[in-house]
Amino acid sequence: MAADAWSAPEVGFLAGVATNPVARGKGLSRQVCGFVTAELVKRHGRAALMVDGDNAAAIAVYERLGYTYRKVAAARLR
């Protein structure tokens, strides 16, 4: 599954991406994310998302869809 969440007028935001472990490896995430991404770009002109840097499988899907991975600064409590 994937959803349009927290979008702004200039950028659509892809979120809530999840694949049932039983359904992984079948290209379903690419299809769903591709559809949502296309709709976000159609409505907002561009799309963005956040992904954990160690989630190589997700990053590979997003890069195939045209996203570019960029590290961002984040803070955490110690």
Image (cartoon, grey):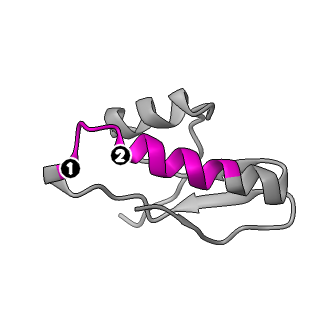
Q: Is residue 7 above or below residue 73?
A: below
User: SS class of the residue under badge 2?
Assistant: helix
Q: Is residue 21 left or right of residue 3?
A: left
Q: Give the residue number, with chain letter if any, for mark 1.
A: 23
Image position, residue 35 (x, y; %): 57, 50
Task: Look at label 2 and name its amino acid.
Answer: Leu
Q: Which mark is residue 48?
A: none
Image position, residue 69 (x, y; %): 57, 33
Q: Are marks 2 and 1 in contact (CB under 8 Å)?
A: yes
Q: Is residue 2 visible?
A: yes
Q: Is residue 49 visible?
A: no
Q: Is residue 60 left or right of residue 15?
A: left
Check the picture and name the quadrant holding the C terminus: bottom left
Q: Which mark is residue 28?
A: 2
Cα gap from disc 2 to disc 1, whole angstroms: 8 Å
Image position, residue 10 (x, y; %): 86, 58
What residue sits 66% from the left and 72% below the top? 6
User: SS class of the residue under badge 1?
Assistant: helix
Image position, residue 55 (x, y; %): 34, 40
Q: Which residues are magenta?
A: 23-38
Q: Residue furthest bottom?
A: 6
What residue sits 63% from the left and 49% below the top? 37
Residue 56 shown in magenta: no
Camera-side residue of 73 and 27: 27
Please name the predominant secondary structure of the magenta segment in the image.
Answer: helix
Check the picture and name the quadrant holding the N terminus: bottom left
Q: Is residue 69 left or right of residue 11?
A: left
- Mark 2 vs mark 1: which is more N-terminal? 1
Q: Residues within 10 Å of mark 1 (few under 14, many from 20)?
A: few
What residue sits 55% from the left and 44% below the top? 34
